Image: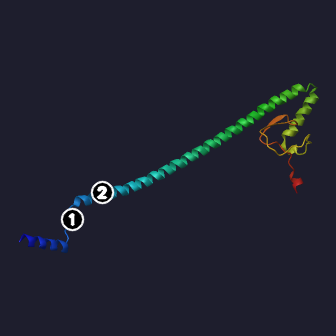
Amino acid sequence: MTKTNNKEKEKAFLAYPMKRTNSGSQNNFYFLKIIFVFLLFYQFFLLVEMNEQFHQKNNTTNLNQTQIIKKQKNLHESLVKILSRTINKNNLQNSLGSNRQIEETLDRKRKFTNINNYASTELQEPYPTIPFLWERVPQMGKIVFGTRFLPTKTPIDRK
């Protein structure tokens, strides 16, 4: 009897498989899915936040670079002013002459400092277009940074 009962049970089991009664493992599976989805959203949120922080850092570095460039330009201008003053004083002291000679030297220097009049003044030597960091222009009596002041054509000459 037991053998027939077991065979009948096996046939019944194959015909109608049993429902899973282990609902605890299924609940764990759904819980893991929820955690996985939450971690995906959290990772996306972290990526967005890191991207924003990166752009904020880039903006601050750009601001810092512009501030540094402004400070460098201010230092450059103050250096040029100080050097031109000292050279002008030395030139005035070296030219031991009357007030008329001092006024002539100042007028000559005023002509060369004005860029518009610079093209019309006579040059003692031709200037190449090679840029120099420190260059002493003899007519101006000043130290010029970067490229030399080249004589430019007036708009009338360009036509």
23 vs 55, nearest the viewer? 23
Q: Residue at x 22, y 61 (%)?
A: 23
Question: Taking 50 as reference, is 127 left or right?
Answer: right
137 vs 106, nearest the viewer? 137
Spatial CA span between label 2 and label 1:
18 Å
Q: Position of residue 30 (x, y in %)?
A: 30, 59
In the rendered structure, find residue 50 and report the number of the disc placed on it: none
137 vs 56, nearest the viewer? 137
Q: Using the image, determine if residue 97 lies above or below residue 135.
A: above
Is the residue marked by circle 1 packed among few (<14), some (14-19), or many (20+) residues within 10 Å? few
Q: Residue at x 87, y 25 (%)?
A: 93
Q: Position of residue 38 (x, y in %)?
A: 37, 55
Q: Using the image, determine if residue 41 lies above or below residue 117.
A: below
Q: Amino acid at mark 2?
A: Phe
Which quarter of the rendering shows the C terminus? bottom right
Where is mark 1, residue-wise?
Answer: 20
Q: Can you tell which quarter of the image residue 66 is in?
A: top right
Q: Can you tell which quarter of the image residue 111 is in?
A: top right
Is the residue marked by circle 2 packed among few (<14), some (14-19), or many (20+) residues within 10 Å? few
Where is mark 2, residue-wise?
Answer: 31
Q: Residue at x 92, y 27 (%)?
A: 99
Nearer to us of marks 2 and 1 is 1
Question: Taking 130 as reference, is 75 left or right?
Answer: left
Q: Amino acid at mark 1?
A: Arg
Question: Taking 70 as reference, is 49 left or right?
Answer: left
The total number of labels drawn is 2
Q: Residue at x 15, y 71 (%)?
A: 10
Counting residues from the start of the chain, the first of labels 2 and 1 encountered is: 1
Q: Position of residue 96 (x, y in %)?
A: 92, 24
